[in-house]
Amino acid sequence: MVVKTLVYHAPETIQVEKLEMEVDAGAISRFQGAIRIPTISYPDRADTATMLTFHEYLETEFPMIHGSLEKQVVGDLSLVYHWKGKDSSVDPALFLAHMDVVPVDESSESNWDFDAFSGEEVDGYILGRGTMDDKGSVLSILEATEGLLKKGFVPEHDIYFAFGHDEEIGGEMGAVKIVEKFAKEKLKFSFIIDEGLVVITDGLSGISKPIGLIGLAEKGAMSMTLTVNLENGGHAMMPPKETAITILSEALVKLKNSPPKVQFNESVDKMFANIGPQMKWPEKLFFANQWLFKPLIASSLSKSNAANALIKTTLAPTIIEGGIMDNVLPSQAKATINVRIVPGETVESVLEYVNATIDDDRISVSSEAVNKPRNPTAISPTDHIGFESIRKSIYEVFGDVIVAPGLVIAGTDARHYSEVVEATYRFMPVMVSNKDLEGIHGVNEKLSIENYKNMVRFYNRLITNFK
C-alpha cells in the first residue's frame, strides 16, 4: 500500500511557460458598457429592444470583427460569427457564450451593495449582473478576436462563435435554433468550449495549488413532482392519523434518509487521477489505494455539498404546496423537487429509485414540468485536440496550477449541441474561490479586472493554439 502511494503519479503534464500579454487599454470600459445593458431573460416575455441594443453595442465596439467575420442572427436574437481560417478542411472549433442574464430577485434586491447593472469599478472589480455569467465570456472572446485581427492574424482553421440570447431560460429559441441551422448546413465541429468550471483556489483539502477544472460532461436535470390526493380533507379539530401533508412529509424524509448511491463516474475518476497524486498525506494515501479506501473517500466527499454533487444524483425539495386555511385539512399536498442526475444514472432510473424509496401508492411521482427532463450528457475524451488546446492555454495564462477534468453540475447551452460536435468542454478562464462563485445568480455578482484580462488572454491563446 505504501509502495503504491509512492509510485502514484499524475498523468504526464505538458511543459509550457506562462506568457505575459498586454490587454488593450479600452477593454475594461467596453466590458463595463456591456454590463450596463440589462439583457434580462424573463420566462414569460422577451425584451427584444434591449437585446437589439446590446447587438448594436457589440457592432460599435468591435468594428474589426464586424468588418471581417461573417455574422448571422439566428432565432431572432442570437448571434453566430464565422471566422475563416487558412485551412477549412479540418472541422472548425465553436466557442459558446450567452448574452442574457438572470433578473435580480426582488426579495434580495436590498441586499445588493451596488446597482446590479452599474458596471462600476470598485477596488479592482467590475460590479454587476452578468460579469461572471456570462457577459465576461462574450466580451472576452470578442476582445481577444478584435486584438488578433488588428495584428493581421488569421487562424489556422475555421472558428465559430455562437452567442445565445435565452440560455437562462433553457435556450430553446437560441441554442436550439443555432443547432438546427448548423445541422441543416451539415456543419460538424471538432470541439466546443462553453462556460463551466473554473480555476478554483480552494477546491479540495490536501491541495495547495489552484485547480483548473475542465468539464467533460454536465449532469442531467429534472423537475419532479410528488402529489398526494385524498378523497377529502376534513376539519382540523378532528384530524385523522395521516393527512395529505403528513404523508407527503414522510415521503420527503424517506428520500432524505436514503439518498441515491455514490457514482464515481468517468469524469470524476479522471479528475482524481490528476489531482490525487498531488495531494498531501494522508489524502494521497487514500486516493492511491482506492481499492481499499473508496468507501472512506465517498463518505468524506459526501460531507461537502459541492463534492457530494459530483458523485451523487441530488434531490432538493424547492416548492411545497398544500392547504388554504389554518383550520382546514387539505385533500391535496404537492412537492416539487429539483433533481440533478449524475452520469451513470438516467431520468428513468431516478424515477425508479424515488418510487421504490417512497413505496407508497398514495403518492404519484411525475417528471412532467415546464422544463423538459434531460439525461446527463456524454463524457468527452481527454485525448482530443480540444482538451489539449484548452489545457495548454490554461497553463500559458495561469502558470503553476493543476489542470484536471471535471463534471459540471449546472446546465449550459452546450448540452444542445451534441449532434454537431465531436467533443464538448466546459471551462470559464477565471481564478476564483468558492465564495466568489456565490454571486452567480445571487447577490453582488462581480468579476475582478485581473480575471477579466485573463479571460481575454485565455481566448487569445486558445484561438492561437487551435492548430
Image: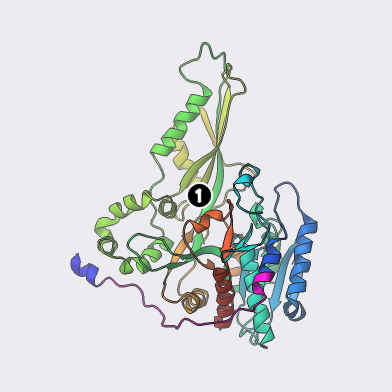
Front-most of residues 319 and 420: 319
Specify start and end residues of the magenta stretch as a single range: 8-29
Q: Closest to the observer: 32 or 225? A: 32
**Relative height, residue 455 to residue 107 (above, below):** below
Judging by the rendered image, the residue that carries numbered circle 1 is 340
Q: Is residue 149 among what the camera can see? A: yes
Please name the residue shown 57% across and 55% down the image.
Answer: 440
Q: Residue at the top extreme?
A: 238
Residue 392 position (above or below residue 424): below
Q: Which quarter shows the N terminus?
A: bottom left
Q: Is residue 168 left or right of residue 448?
A: right
**Does the magenta run of residues contain 439?**
no
Residue at 32%, 50% (x, y): give it: 299
Q: Main secondary structure of the magenta part?
A: loop
Q: Is residue 461 above or below residue 403?
A: below
In the rendering, at what x and y percent does residue 390 appear? 51, 74
Q: Quadrant of residue 74?
A: bottom right
Q: Disc 1 residue type? A: Arg
Question: Does 11 appear in magenta?
Answer: yes
